Image (cartoon, rainbow, N blue to C red):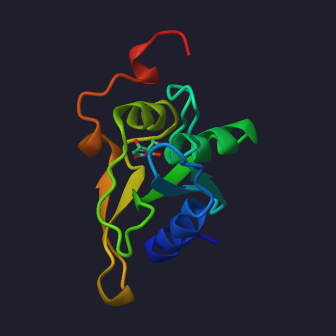
Amino acid sequence: MMKSYDELVEIALEARKMAYTPYSHFKVGAALMTKDGKVYKGCNIENAAYTPTNCAERTAFFKAISEGEREFAAIAIVGGYEDREELGLCSPCGVCRQVMREFCEDDFKIILLTGQTNGENTYEVYDLPEILPLGFGPKDLKVK
Ligand code: THU
């Protein structure tokens, strides 16, 4: 069963609770849904050496890929400082967009939480080429 975008946002909010962020205190959660409706959660995982930090989106992708998943329908992303009561927009970084490009088709949906007024989640939905125009991906290489 496929989850609704509302449900995916809720799962991303659950995933965000696991974020390990002693340095930035900025917590991000992601919920990545495969084409057959399975959902992999991800959170950001920081590191004292800073650069090994992994974003929530890539955590979700790498969990799924490492379990054999290859076909993805959508990802919901939520994020903000840990002391914020209502979250606003958290847009995925360029590295995570490039990881999406590696594994997703052009109709892959990116669901971004935009606000939480009166306990109600609002979000926007984007296609991959909208957030990564002129992207370079597997189709640009002869060897796959
Ligand atoms: N971060 C994510 O996990 N995903 C995003 O889309 C933006 C940034 C993380 C990385 C780092 O742990 C913290 O947020 C601040 O950059």
Classify the position of the N terminus by image quarter: bottom right
Q: Quadrant of the C terminus?
A: top right
**Near-viewer residue (122 or 64):** 122
Ligand 1 is found in the corner quadrant, namely: top left
Location of residue 123 by image quarter: bottom left
Please state the horizontal and vertical placement of residue 78, each as a whole percent of the image: 42, 61
Q: Vertically, is 59 above or below 16?
A: above
* Above or below, comparing residue 134 to residue 144 in the picture: below
Q: Quadrant of residue 83?
A: bottom left
In the depicted structure, whether residue 39 falls above or below residue 115: above
In the image, 46: left or right of 119?
Answer: right
Q: What residue sits 66% from the left and 60% below the top?
A: 38
* x then y, percent, for residue 46: 56, 39
In the rendered structure, the answer to whether residue 1 lies left or right of residue 144 reads right
Q: Residue at x 63, y 58 (%)?
A: 18
- The location of residue 11, given as percent across then percent down, is 57, 69
Figure label count: 0
Where residue 133 sits, quadrant-wise, is top left
Judge left or right: residue 101 versus residue 135.
Answer: right
Give the residue displayed 58% in from the left and 64% down from the top. 17
Q: Nearer the viewer, residue 71 or 62?
A: 62
Q: Position of residue 49 (x, y in %)?
A: 55, 25
